[in-house]
Image: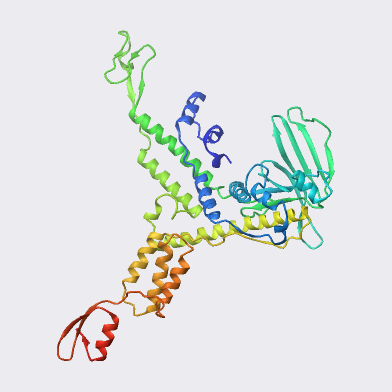
Amino acid sequence: LESYMGGDEYRRAGYLTRYATESNAEYQSRLLATPLANHCSSVIGVYTSFLFRESPTRDLATLEASPVLSDFLRDCDYEGRTLDHFMKDLSTWVSVFGHAWMIVSKPNVGAVTQADEQMIGNRPYLSMLTPLVVTDWQWRRGPTGKYELDYLKYIEEVNGDIQTIKEWTPEMVKTSIVDESRNEYVESPTVETNELGTIPAVLCYNRRSSVRGIGVSDIKDIADQQRFIYNATSEVDQSIRLNTHPSLVKTENTQAGIGAGSVIQLDESMDPSLKPYLLEFTGASVDSIYRAIEDAVATIDKMANTGAIRSTESRTMSGIAMEVEFQMLNSRLSDKAHSIELAEEQMWQLWSLYMNYDWQGTIEYPVSFNVRDAHRDLEFYLTAATANVPSETYRKTLHKQIAEITVENPEIVPEIRNEIDGAATGTFEMDVFEPHVMISPEGERLYVRTEQEHLELAEQGWTHE
């Protein structure tokens, strides 16, 4: 979490290695002087931008008839977030921690009919829980072999030392308000019947680990590389300071000025062997530290499969290496999209259960991401178009690929493809004829400008030059 957040939170965590004789004041000064290159946030930002570049397709079937559906899609958590925004935030924290929880709640306000609930605005809403607030859980395997969540405990709210703790089982819901400083209940816990018959919690994984309920973070190893870069950056700052400002070694009574042309006054009775001198820095050069930082950044890009997208590595990568990198990133993004899609489908099942609907809908997130270097592909197709391949299908295929790359509006691309295909049947005129010189049987020369003129002269026995 600290590696993703960066800023003051990362600085307060003290990830700089402390020197052996460094005082607290010197260490704090070095923390303030060392900038952080937050690669963890950058990598997760790349993933999230690709995952939610296109909105998911939701076919909610029978839920479309619900009068509170539009209100839920517009404000799904009573905090103003749309469902798309909520799922985007969920994906971000899933990438950070490896997994996150989604709770579907609906307060029991004593309404008798759905009309009464609609009148007072009572409907299901979502809450997001990070692993930092989920303190305990338990799974139970049913008779059919299916694992079901049997117990869940989490901190719902924190106000200073006062914490609200929720405990769920399929039979009951227990709410406790605890004073953390005194380790005692503020008031007696309240127990309600869980009328749903199941725990309305959805566990969204990033990648599953060998332990049920624990996911694998996207930045678990990147965070270590980021800490190395952070310390190396501090060494760069220290190297520059020591090179430009050598340490002056002198006795306590020697008076020394500061800056160019400064004067050093020695006591006449001082031993000549104790004269002041400069302590020159002989550590690693700044260039070698920067090379180590560049290697660490390259390692991060390899681990995250973002070498062809992040920074400037694409300038040095070969076309095949970039294509493989794009395919690996596409595979990773596809796995993440499937996980988010599964979590949302499980959420809608619980939402339908609260509203007494039968869930029959489908949720589809984009699982194929067009991760490509458009400039490199365009250059390749333009070069291929200059090849003298005697095939109309080949030429039209190249033109379709060029159109898909250069046209930003995807809605008109099908029309362009149809026009290119129509050129073969005569339904669309395209000037692909190259003017040239033809010679008659008598030796007369004529410059032919149209294909029709060329065909007529060829029937009369005219030939090419």
In percent of width and height, residue 109 lies at: 81, 43
Q: Is residue 423 above or below residue 183?
A: below
Q: Nearer the viewer, residue 193 or 58?
A: 58
Residue 347 falls left or right of residue 192: left
Q: Residue at x 69, y 41 (%)?
A: 133
In percent of width and height, residue 262 lies at: 29, 17
In the picture, the quarter occupied by the N terminus is top right
Q: Is residue 259 above or below residue 463?
A: above
Q: Residue at x 71, y 47 (%)?
A: 125
Q: Is residue 394 above or below residue 32?
A: below
Q: Residue at x 32, y 12 (%)?
A: 271
Residue 306 falls left or right of residue 382: right
In the picture, the quarter occupied by the C terminus is bottom left
Q: Is residue 214 above or below residue 403?
A: above
Task: Name, please, the residue furthest toward the top.
Answer: 269
Count of number-bearing discs: 0
Q: Taking the image as drawn, is residue 293 in sight?
A: yes
Q: Nearer the viewer, residue 60 or 460?
A: 460
In percent of width and height, residue 45 lies at: 52, 48
Here the colouring is: rainbow
In percent of width and height, residue 11 lies at: 52, 33
Residue 14 falls left or right of residue 122: left
Location of residue 454 by image quarter: bottom left
